[in-house]
Image (cartoon, rainbow, N blue to C red):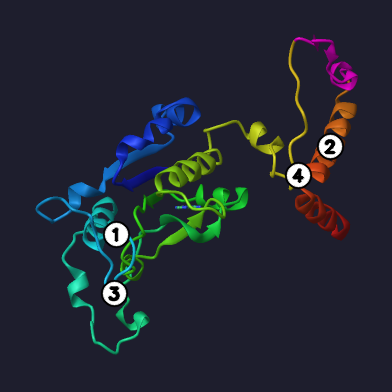
């Protein structure tokens, strides 16, 4: 899978070089490219932001560097298609749309608090794409025409506001990568929290007794059926205690089956 990350702050992405994601890149399972938006600015000072028309607080990211950077990673020319827009005063937004057609299995993601909230299911869907282009917003936002020029999927990582799209991009890349074949073992995915609608059961490793606390007897019994039963019970118990919303959903679905 190819992941292009368009950002004004490429230096923020060091975490993607380590651990599981770093290894997946080394093994050629993931290709992650950091693309500096500033390099695409046609402004003589490489400016990428400006004040909003109509006034208001803060600055907006300008559309030109973003447009050129996205066209670049799509391998498409920037023959100023935007100039051909009707641009009639009375034309509706949809009439003025100049949506670029994306190649198959390609998606553009713009992390934003206004997007659909990320879930494991959504991350798994994203993992099926072959090319994902992340556009990291900054300042007060971006010129809205970006969304008229490209089909863009906005994704939120929760109901709070971060200072930019870089951290959410890393969160989304990390979680979707786990669903890409070969990044982690199928078994790890199967048993983790949310895979079956419940939180994961508690786990223990050596030593068998630490500070006087022994691991649950059943786990060292060698009886695999009993271990599985215990884990299922613990999973449900933990979910009921920590995430009543998930437990209710799980029980509703179980009753239907
Ligand atoms: N950018 C700023 N806040 C965000 C959020 N909660 N999710 C995704 N992108 C964001």
Magenta residues, start to end: 207-222
Q: Mark 1 vs ligand 1: CB under 8 Å?
A: no
Distance from Cα at disc 4 to Cα at disc 1: 43 Å
What is the quadrant of residue 223 in the picture? top right
Report helix, strand or loop for mark 3: loop
Name the residue beneath numbered marker 1: 59
Distance from Cα at disc 2 to Cα at disc 4: 9 Å
Whichever of callouts 2 and 4 sits on the residue coming sooner in the sequence is 4
Name the residue beneath numbered marker 4: 198
Whichever of callouts 2 and 3 sits on the residue coming sooner in the sequence is 3
Distance from Cα at disc 2 to Cα at disc 3: 57 Å
Whichever of callouts 3 and 4 sits on the residue coming sooner in the sequence is 3
Residue at the spot 51% in from the left edge and 55% down from the top edge: 156
Name the residue beneath numbered marker 3: 54
Residue 217 shown in magenta: yes
Contact, mark 4 vs mark 1 (Cβ under 8 Å): no
Question: Residue 82 versus residue 29: which sits nearer the camera?
Answer: 82
Whichever of callouts 1 and 2 sits on the residue coming sooner in the sequence is 1
Quarter of the C terminus within the rendering: bottom right
Q: Nearer the viewer, mark 4 or mark 1?
A: 1
Residue at the spot 25% in from the left edge and 53% down from the top edge: 69
Report helix, strand or loop for mark 4: loop
Question: Which residue is most to the left?
Answer: 44
**Residue 161, position in %: x, y?**
49, 53
Q: Nearer the viewer, mark 1 or mark 2?
A: 1
What is the quadrant of residue 188 in the picture? top right
What is the quadrant of residue 112 in the picture? bottom left
Name the residue beneath numbered marker 2: 232
């Amino acid at each position: 899978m190819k992941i292009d990350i368009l950002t004004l702050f490429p230096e923020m992405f060091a975490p993607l070089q380590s651990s599981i994601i770093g290894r997946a890149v080394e093994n050629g399972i993931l290709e992650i490219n950091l693309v500096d938006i500033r390099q695409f600015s046609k402004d003589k000072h490489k400016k990428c932001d400006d004040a909003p028309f109509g006034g208001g607080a803060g600055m907006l990211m300008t559309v030109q560097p973003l447009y050129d950077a996205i066209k670049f990673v799509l391998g498409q020319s920037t023959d100023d298609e935007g100039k051909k827009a009707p641009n009639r005063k009375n034309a509706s937004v949809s009439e003025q749309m100049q949506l670029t057609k994306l190649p198959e299995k390609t998606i553009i993601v713009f992390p934003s608090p206004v997007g659909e909230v990320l879930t494991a299911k959504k991350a798994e869907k994203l993992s099926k794409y072959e090319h994902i282009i992340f556009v990291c917003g900054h300042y007060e936002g971006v010129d809205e025409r970006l969304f008229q020029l490209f089909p863009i999927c906005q994704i939120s990582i929760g109901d709070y506001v971060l200072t930019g799209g870089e951290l959410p991009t890393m969160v989304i890349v990390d979680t979707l990568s786990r669903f890409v074949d070969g990044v982690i073992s199928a078994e790890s995915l199967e048993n983790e929290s949310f895979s079956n609608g419940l939180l994961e059961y508690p786990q223990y490793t050596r030593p068998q007794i630490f500070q006087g606390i022994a691991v649950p007897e059943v786990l060292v019994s060698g009886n695999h059926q009993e271990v599985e039963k215990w884990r299922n019970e613990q999973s449900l118990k933990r979910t009921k205690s920590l995430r009543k919303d998930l437990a209710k959903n799980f029980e509703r679905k179980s009753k239907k089956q």
